[in-house]
Structure formats: C-alpha cells, structure tokens
Image (spheres, rainbow, N blue to C red):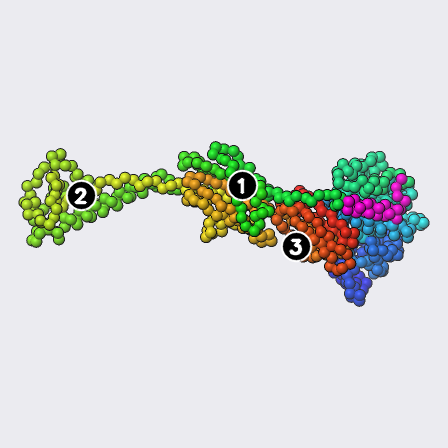
Amino acid sequence: MKKIGKYEVVEKIGVGGFGEVYKAYDPFIKRHVAVKTCSSDDQEVRNRFFQEAEIAGNLHHRNITTVYDFGIQDTLPYLIQEYLSGEDLDHKIKRRDFLPAPEKLYYLLQISRGLAYAHSKGVIHRDIKPANIRILEDGTAKIMDFGIAKLAQQETGLTQTGMTLGTAAYLAPEQIRGDTVDHRTDVFSFGVLAYELMTYERPFQGEQISAVLYQILNHEPRPIRDMVTTASPEIVTVIHRCLHKEPAERFTDGSELLHELELVQRKGRTDRHRGDEERPAAAAATLISPAARRAAEVTPQSGIVQSRPAEVSGPTATTRQRGLDEIELTSVRQERKPPSMMPLRNPKGPPRSWSILRYVAMMAVLAAVALAVGLWMGSPDDRSAGETAEETGSQAGSEEPGSDTEPSTAPAGEGTEPTSDPASATQDPGQPTPAAGEVPGAETATPEEPPPPPEPEPGTLVVPKVEWTDAMTVQVGRRGRKRPLTRQLALPLKAGTYTVTFEVTGDYEATASMSVRIDEAQQRVLIVPIAEPGTLRVRALPGRPQAQILLDGELLGQSPTRRKIAPGEHRIQILPLSGESTGLDQQVNVYSGQETILTFDLEAGEIDDRVKSLDE
C-alpha cells in the first residue's frame, strides 16, 4: 500500500486490534502522521472504530493524542492522528528504567490531567494501561487508543452483558462483574498503572487470566512501601485509594485525582527544601573500583606483608589515592615456585643448567687460547737461524692442536725423564730457560680460574589487569615503554627504585604515579591507583527548562548531559539559559562504578539526586 487517501505511506509501525498502523506523510501540510486502519469485517468492530474516531476526534488536550481526520478508501476505514515519537510507558516499566520520584509523579500528573479533561467531556476511556501511554522525547505523556471508550450518557450497545474489555490486569472489579462503569473505573485502572510505575510490579498477578481476575476481586495488593521504602506516604495513600474495590471509596473522577496529586507534588517540594536546609554538607567519598578491590583480595601465603599506602602523585591523585595500597612479597627464593601468573619472561633469570654450559664454554675458550700461545712460542720463526722442524723433531711432552691429551704439569722427578735431545743444547739464548722437567716448545698449562660469582636474582613487579577499561597503560621508569593493562603483567627488574606511571585515556582521562622500590629476588604486586570513574547525569525534569551545567567551576555543557568523572564530592551549578529564574547550586557525591543522576526543576528551584545501582 503506497497511499491512503492523500497520505503517502512511509512504513508499517504496528498492528492493532482493528488492523494496521502506518507512518505516513501529508504532502500538503508537510508533516508526518499516523494512519490507523480497520481491516476487520466484523460489523461490531467496525462500529467501535467509528466510535473511536468520533470520541477522540472531539478531544483536544496536550495529554491526549490528537485526531486530524477520518476517511474510507475502498471500504477500508482509516483514522489520521498525530505521529508520536518516543516510546510507550510500558517499555520503561519492563526495562525497569531508573526514574526519580519527581519524574514518576510528573508522568502521573500528566495522565491525570488528560483523564480529567476526558471525564469533563463525558468520556470514559476504559482501557488505561502503560501500553496506552506514550512518553514523548520531551517528557510529555499522551493517552492513546480510545477504541473501547464510551460516553457516560450514552449506551452504545457495543458491549454485551458480562463482556469485559481491556487488559485483564488493569480491569476494575465492576468491569469484571459486568456492572455499570463510570469515571471511577478509569481511576482504578490509573491506580494499577501508578502502582506498577512505582514498584515495577503489578499489584494483581497470576499465570492465568482467571487467577488475575480473582486477585482483583478478592485480594489486596502488597503495600508499596514494602517494596519501595523511599516512596512518600502521600503518594502511597493516593494510589491505594485508587485501588479500592468499592467505587464509592475511590476518587470520583480525574479532576479530584489530579487535585490530590498536585497536593502531593507541593508537599514533596516543601519537604525537600526543608531537608536541604537541615542536611549537613556531605563528606568527600571515594570508592575503590571493583577491579582494584578484587586485586587487593590476595590469598594469604608465606612472605606476604601489607605495606603502607602507595605514594601517588599527579594532578588527579588527591581524589584517587585514598584506600589504595601496595602488596609486597618479600624474600622469594629461587627454589620457590613462581606465582600463578603468565610473566613476560622468566623473572628468576636463566636456569642453573645454562650456568654450567656457560662455565664449560669459558674453560674451552681459555684452553684454546693457551694452546695457541704455546704453538706460537715453539714456532720455527722464533728459533735460531738454520733450524728446521726436521732438525729438532718432535719434542717430548709437546701436543698437537686439537689433541685430547692434557699438557703435562708434573714437577721434575715425578713421572718425567731427562731429555738427551741435542736440540736442547743449542736453544736460542733469547728463549727463557725451561724449568726442570719442562719441555721447550710444549704448551704451558694455565691454572684453572674460579667460576664467576652468580648474578643477582632480579626482582619482579606484578601489575594486575584493569577490568573496567582497555585504555589504561603502565610505564616503569621515565623512558620505559607504555604497556596496556589488558592482562596481568609480571616485569623482571634489577634492584632499585622505579617511578611507575599509570595513565587512562579516552572519554575519561586520568594519570597517577608512584615510587616503587624493588630488591633482589623480591616480588611486588601493585594495586592500580586510578579508581574506576563514576557517571554523572544531569537532566531537567521532563517539560521543564534546560540549563547550563558547571562541574567544579568548569562548564560541562547544556543539559541533558552525561559524563564520566572522578569519584568523590563535586560542586554542581545549574544556570538558566535565560534570566527568568535563579540558578541552583549543590554538592553531590559521585561513586566509583555507579551512576549519579541529578534531576532539576529550575521553575520550582529544586534538585533531586539519586544513585543508580550497578544491577539496575
């Protein structure tokens, strides 16, 4: 389907009880609209569709969906209404969105205003539920779907005796019994919606529709304050009165309900102002990040001692070093097994077998050098003129290069015989006289050198993995390379004092340094001194003016804004974009790994702050 009437169909956006819903474009007014069609052949359903067009088309209110036009194309009835952005309130409840109490009350006030207007026109909606409330992007709440609405003074004949319409969980007792319905029926459904918005649980539950209907008729819902201890007694009283099983005990219509909710809002503002005056200034608070907390929980073992807190320096150290310690592992000898981690290389140096091989190689080199010196001393160039190798012959005790026989080093009279070789009598006077029992030209034995002293065992610096970010690096020394902390590091280091610098970049930037002493054969495990940041979200109450936000005197931006900042106490200033109202100023604590949400209302001069838990 490309066109419905004059409207150009863009896409299908839903399927309703009567037919399909499309997003379309009005080429003349140049705006998007929603087109609701009725494709059913059932005459009663078609009559109900015509009734919705009649009733909703005559309601013009900010909190009710506006109907622009109605028509029939090739026997297909269609309804043209405003195209609504945003999402249904039902989606927020199912996601359990974090909504401050003033924001929830703001939605309930808007719904009650729409109901009050409809009731003033004699219209009973009969199907108030979160799925029929649209929350626009600016926070406006709109009541939708008047498909089963009726006029209080008109009997439509569209509902047979005993037939119940709407969603079972939101039906009033009189709807279930088939009794006469009136404005108080909408008040009961509103009470179910408000209960669910406050607690994210329905007041009447069951696996079968019959069980839900039995609950509505016979059971009282669980008290709201059992689930939401911070709920004000005033809003709890209003909701439970809406849920009274007897219509006479409820509010008479939307106007009376709206009046009570406005009283709740005014009292809440008064109580908050009084609480702000009596509340002392909060102390600065910094929570250790979950990753650092896990790293600190080291299993006790021999040699572990807790050292003093690490000395942290840097521009952000004042809010990040508190509660952060080093863990020191002292006197870890070579015989002990290394800790269960993956080092970059062997922190204890080469194995003992390498030292033995190195010693053997050194001795072989020394022997080769000594042999070469001996051959040089006995070469023909150093003898008297006219002597040749054939004339001198082989001399006793001399060794050829590469032989396996060790040169003789025994003294005279101990296993050697005096030589009678004539060559010895004609020895060059320039050559030194051989000692008794020493053969001229033979290799002179070199005394065995003592093995070199063992090299000092290096220490090891262990830096745990950072869980909350992949953008943190660690640098050991002023010129060391930056290593990412995406896994645990074990760095072998010579004994000495090192400057260790941590840095995180990206949407949250921080730097911290500490001085670490490493001794021989010592292992030190560091805790990262930069705590996981908290998140600060500042926004105006839906429908209220926006503002400029200052964080600790620096411009953060225009609301709504959301930023990761260092945990601790901060000063938030909220300044109006125009001079119509005064600004707001408040100290707020931001906690590591958690979200602090500030919702403000410049017109009322109030701020509501809540901390969103990690599991919400």
Between disc 3 and disc 1, whose residue precedes? Answer: 1
Q: Is residue 386 above or below residue 6?
A: above
- Residue linked to disc 1: 309
Disc 1: CA contacts within 10 A as few (<14), some (14-19) or many (>=20): some
Residue 210 visible in this rendered orientation of the protein: no
- Give the quarter of the figure containing the N terminus: bottom right
- With 316 as the anchor, is 385 left or right in this view? left
Looking at the rendered structure, the kind of residue marked 2 is Thr
The magenta segment: 249-274
Looking at the rendered structure, the kind of residue marked 1 is Pro
- Residue linked to disc 3: 553
The answer to if 323 sits in the magenta stretch is no
Q: Secondary structure at mark 3?
A: loop
- Give the quarter of the figure containing the C terminus: top right
The answer to if 252 sits in the magenta stretch is yes
- With 232 as the anchor, is 474 left or right in this view? left
Pinpoint residue 329: horizontal percent, then vertical percent: 47, 37
Between disc 2 and disc 3, whose residue precedes? Answer: 2
Q: CA distance from mark 2 to mark 3?
A: 85 Å
- Residue located at (43% from left, 41% from top): 519
Looking at the rendered structure, the kind of residue marked 3 is Gly
Q: Secondary structure at mark 2?
A: loop
Pinpoint residue 229: horizontal percent, then vertical percent: 75, 38
- Residue linked to disc 2: 444
Pinpoint residue 155: horizontal percent, then vertical percent: 93, 48
